Amino acid sequence: MPLSGYPFANLNVNAIFGYNFITMPNTYTQLYIHCVFAVKYRKAIIQSEWDERLHQYITGILQNNGHKLLAINSMPDHLHFFVGLNPKQSISDMLRLVKGDSSEFVNKEKFTKRKFYWQDGYGAFSNSRSQIDSVVKYIINQKQHHSKNIQRRIPGHVAGLCR
């Protein structure tokens, strides 16, 4: 579409401001997202006998969609993961795939006696690069965190999502 009809369309911005605009040939992002979601009705049905297989399956989903998994862990009633987000996929699409495909996996493998569902909602929290270590440690240490029943304010820990 020609810009001739727009005011200031013929101005030479480079000359006015002294900038030499160069297009960026690549996309660079630092999008670190901590996700948490629960089993439907917060039922404590994720068992230690199969939680590692669930983590591996979710890892595959994330990697196949171009995300970089930094940490994953679960408790019997909820799951956390922390990713470097691929900007080509929205957070909602990523979580829709992770939750849908992983619940299908749990049901196909018959890990539970009844049909397995995740809750509809989720938490997704952005973190800066400087927070990576603390978020990874928080996720890795979920069992210790919950055994002590601590409610610390830490990136991604919101009352109601983690008990």
Image (spheres, rainbow, N blue to C red):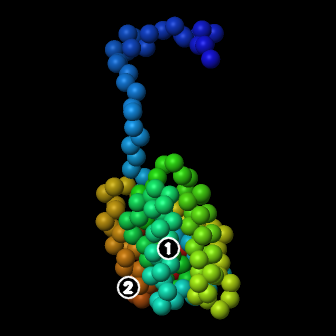
Residue at 68%, 88% (x, y): give it.
114
Q: Is residue 104 left or right of residue 88?
A: right
Task: Give the x, y percent position of residue 42.
Answer: 61, 82
Q: Is residue 31 left or right of residue 102?
A: left
Label 1 – label 2 distance at C-alpha: 24 Å
Say whether residue 157 is visible. Answer: no
Say whether residue 68 is visible. Answer: yes
Seen from the viewer's position, the closer of residues 107 and 142 is 107
**Disc marking residue 144:** 2
**Disc marking residue 123:** none
Residue at 63%, 75% (x, y): give it.
104
Q: Nearer the viewer, mark 1 or mark 2?
A: 1
Seen from the viewer's position, the closer of residues 34 and 110 is 110
Q: For the residue marked with disc 1, what is the amino acid?
A: Tyr
Q: For the residue marked with disc 2, what is the amino acid?
A: Gln
Secondary element at image label 1: helix
Residue 119 vertical position relative to residue 125 in the rendered view, above or below: below
Looking at the rendered structure, the number of numbered marks drawn on it comes to 2
Picture quadrant where residue 22 is located:
top left
Residue at 59%, 13% (x, y): give it.
3
Task: Name the quadrant of the N terminus.
Answer: top right
Q: Is residue 55 left or right of residue 28?
A: right
- Residue named by callout 1: 57
Picture quadrant where residue 14 is located:
top left
Residue at 48%, 60% (x, y): give it.
64
Task: Give the x, y percent position of residue 43.
Answer: 61, 86
Secondary element at image label 2: helix
Density class for disc 1 (Cα within 10 Å; few <14, some 14-19, many ≥20) is some
Task: Give the x, y percent position of residue 134.
Answer: 33, 67
